[in-house]
Structure formats: structure tokens, C-alpha cells
Amino acid sequence: MSARLALAVPRLPRLDPLGALLTALGAAALVLLPFVVLKPNRILPGEPVAMLAALPGWGAFACQAILALAALAALAASNARVRLTAALFGVVAVALALGAAADALTPAGNRVVRVAPGAAVWVLLTCLGLLATDAITRLSPGPASRVLFLALFIGVAGLALVHGTFDNLSVMREYTVNADRFAREARQHVWLAFGSLTAAFIVALPLGILCHRAPRLRAPVLGVLNVIQTIPAIALFGILMAPLASLAAAVPLAAALGIRGVGAAPAAVALFLYSLLPIAANTVAGLKRVPRTVVEAARGMGLTEWQVLGAIELVLALPVILTGVRIVLVQNIGMVTVAALIGGGGLGTFVFQGIGQTAIDLVLLGAIPVVALAFSAAVVLDALIEIRDRART
């Protein structure tokens, strides 16, 4: 009888541990933390405002209802697509609520008041982002799908910015004031990151091949590059300032080309030096992974050493080499931010200017694009590495 009763009782769904943690954090943030911060200007501290006070009743109810559905999916749904859809709808709901709150709290025609995201927004977006990441991991999408998803996300975000959905948000107010300078510093940031990577690849790839072919050189060469890698970025920038300033003073042509003790030159040289080790070491590791039987078979077919290197070894080692390129690119995108301290320009200019002025919105204007650029570069290169790795197998 007891066994029949046990079978008749419906079994409750098993709660997802990660979903339970994220739901608890999100609910606590929504109840205890401010949704936005209303500031009289860009510098003075502001007044915390809860979601119910910042939005009309229907807007707050709609956002909370969508977040409740996302929490339900996080807790009980095992289907990865359902979890991903719920997380994306949650992100859209929080973003639209944030834009609506900025519009509602900003007086008409007022260009001084600032409405900044509150702690609740950052916690909610982090929880929803982790939920989406967990769902994507469970789905294990292919490289093309990941790049397509990234492009779609960037497209939707770009349309929202162009439409003016977030125009009254504090960070967008800062962008409006600094639009021309932002475009210039963004170009400088990209140029320093990709330019130093290109120069390092041209040097490090042959260096890695040489270390592979001449094992006696491997330890000293990689050891020197490893020592350079251990020097803190700001220290290396400072070390390079003196010799570059002397070079500019002694060689007028160098000064005419923009080589000086401060500015982009020491930043580019430092980034170039930092980029050598990952590419060279990964080139050595990739070439070591190439099966010797394949190399011997190619030589037996009459291929020269250069043909074996170009058509066999480098092709098979390419996924590992690209992994080093990915490390360097993401590293450089972040390190260019520090180059602003020595006049190198880039988006770090807004970060340090905002720190100096105690203007958090200006800091975010520089920091958010750096994070987005590094994340996008990592996704694209990871997809490219996976494609090449599949082709290799």
C-alpha cells in the first residue's frame, strides 16, 4: 500500500544548483540594491533609485515578470535552448528597463543630470550572462554558430544604440560629449593592438621555427622572451622611454616618424616584445606535435625541406600557432589600455581621465568597449582555431 502511495505522489523537479544560486543572487540584488543611480551631474554622488520608483508600474511589472520566468527556467528547465532563450529575454528586459528608467528620470532638455546603472543592473546582467554561458556550453554550438550568434548580438546592440534607446543613460551622455575623440582613440587602440601583433607574428614565427629546428637555441631564446614577459607592463613602458627619447634626439628621421620617449612608440614596442613569447612558444609546440611519420613520408615523396615546412608542418601546426595569436591579441587589447598612461592613446585615455575626475561614467566609456573588443576577438579566433583543428583531423 505504501509503495502504491509513493508511486502516486508526483515527483518534484530537481532544482539546478547553478540556477538556484543565480536566482538567489538576482532576487537579492533586485530587492536590496538600487536599480539606477540618479546624479545631479557627472561627478557628484547620486541617489539610489529602486526599479519600482524608476519605472511606471506596468514597466516594472513586465520586467519583473520576464525575470521571474528566466528564474523559473534557470531553476527547473533542463533543456539548454530554453535556458538560453530565457537568459536572452532577461538581458533584453533589463536593458530596456534601464533605458526606460533613464528616460523617465531625466528632465526634458536637461543635459546635466546623469542616470547611471545601479548595482542591481550589474548583478542581474552578470547572473543572466552566466546562465546564457552555461546554456551555450551545454549546447556545444559549432564555430560558425558562435560567430553568427556574436554578430547577431552586436547587430542588435548596435541597432539599439542607433535608435537612441539608451541616449539618456549616463555613459551615452559621455559618448555624446566625446564622440569625435572616441572614434580617434578607438582607432588608435585597434591600431596598437593589431599592429603590434602583426609585427610580432612576422618575427616570432621564424624564431619559433628556428628554435624547433635548432633545439640548442630553444632554451636561451625562450628564456629571454620569458624574462621580458615577467616585467610588469607599466615598468616596461617606463624602461623604453629613455632609449626611445635618446634615439629621437640623435636621429631626426626617427623623430619625424613619431618615435619619441612618450606616446605610441614605447607602447607599440612594449606590446611587440610582450607578443613574442606566446607566438614563438606555440610555434615550437605546434611543430613538435606534427607526426614524424608524416614528415618522413613527405620527404620520401621528394618534397624539399621548405616544401615540407610550408605544406605539411606549418599547416598541421596552425591550430596551436593560432592559439598563441589568440592569447596575444586578447592580451594586447587589454594592455593597450595601460598605454594611455604614457600618452599612447587608445580607449584607456577615457579610463584614466575618468579616474582622475572621479567620473565613473567616463571610465565605463573606455572600459566597456575594451571588454567587448577582447571578447569578440576571443570568440572569432576560437572559432577559427576549431575550424582548423577539425580540418587537421
Image (cartoon, grey):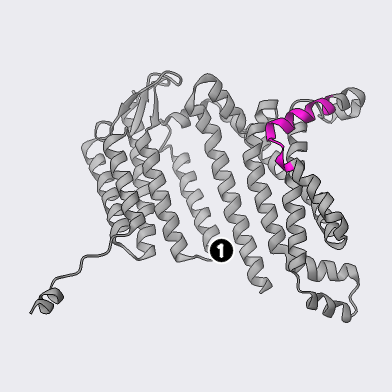
Q: Residue at x 78, y 65 (%)?
A: 314
Residue 115's quadrant in the figure?
Answer: top left
From the top left corner, tell me how far across and down residue 192 is, in percent: 71, 39
The quarter of the image holding the C terminus is bottom right
Q: Is residue 166 left or right of residue 382?
A: left
Q: Residue at x 33, y 40 (%)?
A: 97
Q: Is residue 173 left or right of residue 318?
A: left
Q: Observer-nearest residue: 367 or 23?
A: 23
Q: Residue at x 67, y 57 (%)?
A: 323
Label 1: which secondary element: helix
Q: Observer-nearest residue: 265 or 243?
A: 243
Residue 244 part of the magenta-drawn span: yes
From the top left corner, tell me how far across and down residue 106 is, in percent: 35, 26
Residue 72's quadrant in the figure?
Answer: bottom left
Q: Is residue 22 left or right of residue 321?
A: left
Dominant SS in magenta? helix
- What residue does disc 1 label? 144
Picture mark count: 1
From the top left corner, tell me how far across and down residue 381 is, in percent: 63, 56
Pointer 1 local density, CA inside 10 Å: few below 14, some 14–19, many at least 20: some
Q: Residue at x 34, y 65 (%)?
A: 78
From the top left corner, tell me how far across and down residue 53 is, in percent: 25, 31
On the question of residue 348 being in view, the answer is yes
Residue 337 part of the magenta-drawn span: no
On the question of residue 198 being in view, the answer is no
Is 52 placed above or below 198 here? above
The quarter of the image holding the N terminus is bottom left
Q: Residue furthest left?
A: 1
Residue 352's quadrant in the figure?
Answer: top right
Magenta-drawn segment: 229-245
Q: Give, as a three-letter code, the residue at label 1.
A: Ala
